[in-house]
Image: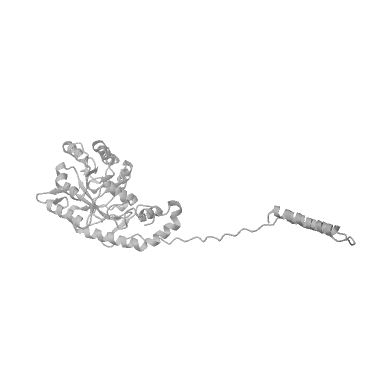
Amino acid sequence: MQPIVRFFLALSLVSVILTACQSAPASPTPDLGPALTQAVATALAQLATPTFTPSPVPTATVARTPPPLPALFTTTLPDPLVKPHTYIQDACQYLKDKWTPTNAAPGTIVMAVMIHSITKGTITDPLGQISVQNFKQLMNDLHEQGFTAITAQQLVDFLYTNAKIPERSVILIQDDRKTAENFTEHFLPYYQQWGWPVVNGWISLDDSIGRQYLPENVALSKQGWVDYEAHGVVHNVPISSTSSDEYMRGELFGSMQAIQKNFGKTPVAYIWPGGGFTPKAVQLARQAGYKIGFTTSPRGPMMFNWIPQRDQDDPQNPWYIAEGSSGDPLMTLPRYYDSTAGAHIDEARQIGQQADAYAEQNKATELDYYNIVCAAKYGAIPAQ
């Protein structure tokens, strides 16, 4: 009860007693002194002693226990010694990027295809050459299986933040310096028909070939469908454990600077010449500013936070360097050879389907984990 209310009640009580005393009929006057004194004392005591109405006690919130996250998706389709490697350490950020509905859908795959020489003549190097006919067959097979070509920057955005790309994507990488005619004859028809760009791994050596091919390639780059990326300077001496820091820096930083100067763009990809790299070279590539790097090892397709790699060398293919030691899957991405990529298209498609099914199977668990552990800091994942 509020103090002011008790005060007026006490005054009312005293008033009643006094009125009773005044209106009593004539009779022997009783001694009301003790009673009046007691009534006033009681009223004043009630006024002086506050009473409180207890507030409701809130019900204790029971902390929810997050479920364990599912194991990383694996597949038995590629080489059994090839294992998927992740590169995102923050589970909350990974889950948010994975399940944001405007991003790439789970199971989105990217095949990287390495192209060296498309020849009209006799094939003398099965790994370095592909006939015009087989190249056309490869492109048609990719298209019929639902693949779409993307640029290096699109691949970077996908691998880093799961930015939306076609669910079946391919990045076509033409290695080395080529004439503008090479691109217009072999790649332009697919850009005109399907909007497919091509990536060129440009060698930045300032020699007679470079001075001959550079002007026409600079002009071609302005058309927007050939994406020029770094492929070393000297190039024909692959980086290895015997390479000096000076040589590695010259290849990585020199190629970056030359492309900035000649093509007016900063490359995001480094195509390792000959597939050669070392852990130190990978660190230097990061220092130079590259976002991704490509090997010559055909490990399989790539997915968001999922790069197939080997942790041990392959005795049957000693030229395929084990990528695990680099500690940086994004700088050691796999590539299929053009001459054998066609045989792996359906395999890549199946891996994407399996990954999609596995993600859907574990979606509720991952979203429950996110809501308990992550949502307060990272915000809610938008509804589908």
Q: Position of residue 376 (x, y in %)?
A: 46, 53
* Towards the viewer: 20 or 381: 20
Q: Residue at x 30, y 41 (%)?
A: 245
Percent of width and height locating residue 264: 26, 37
4 relative to 338 in the view: left or right: right
Vertical order, 372 against 279 (above or below):
below
- The residue that appears at 14% across and 43% down in the rendered structure is 181
From the viewer's side, name the closer residue of 194 and 282.
194
Decide: is 264 above or below 17.
above
Total labels: the figure holds: 0
Location of residue 384 (image quadrant): bottom left
Q: Quadrant of residue 96?
A: bottom left
Q: Is residue 90 left or right of residue 348?
A: right
Describe the colour scheme in one phrase: one colour
Residue 70 seen in the figure: no
Q: Position of residue 7 (x, y in %)?
A: 73, 53
Residue 113 vs residue 364, the one in the foreground: 364
Residue at x 39% of width, y 62% of height: 364
In the picture, measured across the screen, residue 61 lies left or right of residue 91, that is: right
Quarter of the picture containing the N terminus is: bottom right
- Residue 113 screen position, x and y as percent: 22, 52
